[in-house]
Image: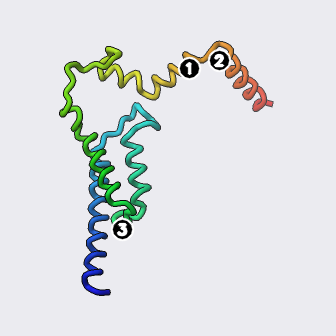
Amino acid sequence: MPRPAREAQEGAANMAASRYRRFLKLCEEWPLDETKRGRDLGAHLRQRVAQAFREGENTQVAEPEACDQMYESLARLHSNYYKHKYPRPRDTGFSGLTVEQCRTVLATDALEEFKEMNKGLWKKLQERFAAKNQEDKTKE
């Protein structure tokens, strides 16, 4: 292989490895929110990076510009770039709840409780009797 072609190929491989390492570092720094089981952005990010870079540093990135843009967007979110660029006068939203109160309300356990509270009486009775019928069938 001619030297310029080999150097270009090595340069592309180095860029792919560099992209992979940057995404790994971002994943390591991104916190996991245990209260949002199955809905956590950090867990989703880790999963997507694992899918996108299946071959690790040897993964060939099909769209390098889009990959770099995605990384930059995620890095800005992680660093709270927009929070600092556009500071809020108060730490509450339109609801009047504080950040901690919003976290509590949006926790997976709280959402499941709300879902259960919103079920009608008829639906709750149906579920209870369906479960009881299943228990009776397994005892027989």
Q: How far apart are the two marked residues, 2 and 3, measured between alpha carbons?
A: 53 Å
- Residue 63 x, y percent position in the rendering: 37, 60
Residue 115's quadrant in the figure? top right
- Residue 22 x, y percent position in the rendering: 27, 55
Residue in the image at 36% along x and 42% along y: 42
Amino acid identity at mark 2: Lys
Left or right of 112 on screen, residue 137:
right
Disc on res. 133: none
Left or right of 100 on screen, residue 129:
right
Indicate which disc, 1 or 2, sits on the residue closer to the N terminus: 1
Indicate which disc, 2 or 3, sits on the residue closer to the N terminus: 3
Disc on res. 116: 1
Mark 2 nearby-residue class (10 Å; few <14, some 14–19, many ≥20):
some
Amino acid identity at mark 3: Asn
Amino acid identity at mark 1: Glu
Q: How far apart are the two marked residues, 3 and 1, measured between alpha carbons?
A: 47 Å
Tag 1's secondary structure?
Answer: helix
Q: How far apart are the two marked residues, 1 and 2, measured between alpha carbons?
A: 8 Å
Residue in the image at 18% along x and 33% along y: 85
Tag 2's secondary structure?
Answer: helix
Picture layout, residue 51 above or below residue 41 = below
- Mark 3 highlights which residue? 58
- Residue 121 x, y percent position in the rendering: 65, 13
Tag 3's secondary structure?
Answer: helix
Tell whether label 2 touches label 1 (CB within 8 Å): no
Which one is closest to the eye, mark 2 or mark 3?
Answer: 3
Q: Quadrant of the N terminus?
A: bottom left
Mark 3 nearby-residue class (10 Å; few <14, some 14–19, many ≥20):
some
Mark 1 nearby-residue class (10 Å; few <14, some 14–19, many ≥20):
few
- Mark 2 highlights which residue? 124
Tell whether label 3 touches label 2 (CB within 8 Å): no
Residue in the image at 81% along x and 31% along y: 140
